């Protein structure tokens, strides 16, 4: 397995994905997250907050936007079933891994797996694996206003890993992946999720709230980032080696 990064030009589908990820999805999350500010929750007959239905729609929109650039991979040919199965399998592994460690808060392998997906199959695949994992795993953990934010955060970690690898700024060595995994999990996932807590909980958006929420989140964010490093140390080399062998043998999902 080659560990030397090779710089490649970003393709059209990557720019399309970046447009959705940088502009459209954050705008949706902020708009609907802001709807919680100062809103008195109304409940339906089953005791579910009515406003949370908006976030189910946002979750669906994120999945659709994640699929558009992913399926642009097949614009010049038909997709093969095995290519879709690989993405589904990676998402299933991430969901199972998150469920397997449910007893340890924030000690999860999801970020490690989406990083591996992004490095092996491109940023679009990394984002799709992350978004699907966030949605499906919350059928076990509980759906809510946090779901689309988690989908977005998992997806961004995988997408950015794929982009950095394509640009030659990230290699497949354990050290490189672990450094990226730690900082991406702590600052991107943790940073965005802490901000989402303020919006979805209807807390006042001011400096005092930001300091309180982000400070309180540091221990959990450190555990999450540390667990990502641990899982990358254990999983990165064997998974990347096997995925590269499959990709080479069948010519699948070239990033």
Image (cartoon, grey):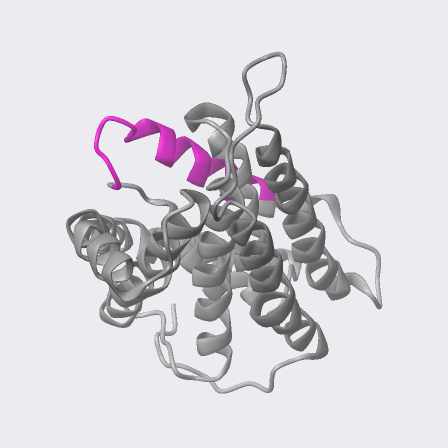
Q: Position of residue 141 (x, y in %)?
A: 42, 27
Query: Seen in the image, is 247 located left or right of residue 201?
Result: right
Q: Quadrant of the N terminus?
A: bottom left
Asked if the magenta segment contains residue 34, the reply would be no
Residue 19, can we see it? yes
Horizontal and vertical percent position of residue 67: 70, 54
Q: Is residue 104 left or right of 141 when viewed as pictured?
A: left
Q: Main secondary structure of the magenta part?
A: helix
Q: Residue at x 60, y 41 (%)?
A: 55
Quadrant in the rendering for residue 10: bottom right
> Looking at the image, which is closer to me, 93 or 132?
132
Residue shown at the point (57%, 71%) measured from the top left: 22
In x, y percent, where is residue 120? 49, 63
Q: Residue at x 61, y 29 (%)?
A: 50
Q: Is residue 97 above or below residue 67?
A: above
| Residue interval drawn in magenta | 88-106
Q: Residue at x 42, y 31 (%)?
A: 96
Q: Pick the residue in front: 191 or 80.
A: 191
Looking at this view, is 244 or 97 the one in front?
A: 97
Q: Quadrant of residue 78?
A: bottom right
Total number of numbered discs in the rendering: 0
Residue placed most toward the observer, 188 or 40: 40
- Magenta span has 92? yes
Give residue 27's position: percent from left, percent from top. 60, 63
- As drawn, the residue found furthest toward the top would be 45
Quadrant holding the C terminus: bottom right
Vertical relation: 25 (above or below) 89: below
């Amino acid at each position: 397995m080659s560990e030397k990064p090779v710089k490649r030009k970003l393709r059209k589908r990557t720019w399309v994905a970046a447009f959705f990820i940088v502009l459209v999805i954050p705008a949706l999350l902020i708009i609907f997250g802001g709807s919680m500010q100062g809103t008195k929750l109304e409940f339906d007959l089953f005791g579910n907050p009515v406003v949370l239905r908006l976030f189910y729609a946002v979750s669906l929109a994120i999945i659709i936007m994640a699929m558009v650039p992913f399926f642009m991979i097949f614009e010049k040919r038909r997709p093969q079933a095995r290519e879709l199965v690989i993405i589904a399998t990676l998402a299933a592994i991430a969901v199972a891994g998150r469920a397997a460690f449910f007893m340890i808060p924030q000690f999860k392998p999801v970020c490690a797996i989406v990083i591996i997906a992004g490095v092996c199959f491109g940023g679009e695949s990394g984002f799709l694996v992350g978004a699907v994992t966030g949605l499906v795993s919350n059928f076990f953990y509980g759906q809510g206003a946090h779901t689309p934010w988690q989908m977005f955060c998992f997806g961004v970690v995988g997408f950015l890993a794929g982009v950095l690898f394509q640009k030659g700024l990230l290699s497949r060595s354990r050290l490189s992946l672990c450094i990226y995994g730690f900082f991406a999990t702590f600052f991107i996932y943790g940073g965005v999720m802490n901000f989402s807590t303020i919006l979805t909980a209807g807390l006042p958006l001011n400096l005092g709230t930001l300091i309180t929420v982000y400070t309180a989140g540091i221990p959990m964010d450190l555990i999450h980032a540390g667990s990502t490093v641990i899982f990358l140390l254990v999983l990165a080399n064997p998974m990347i080696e096997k995925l590269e062998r499959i990709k080479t043998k069948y010519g699948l999902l070239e990033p």
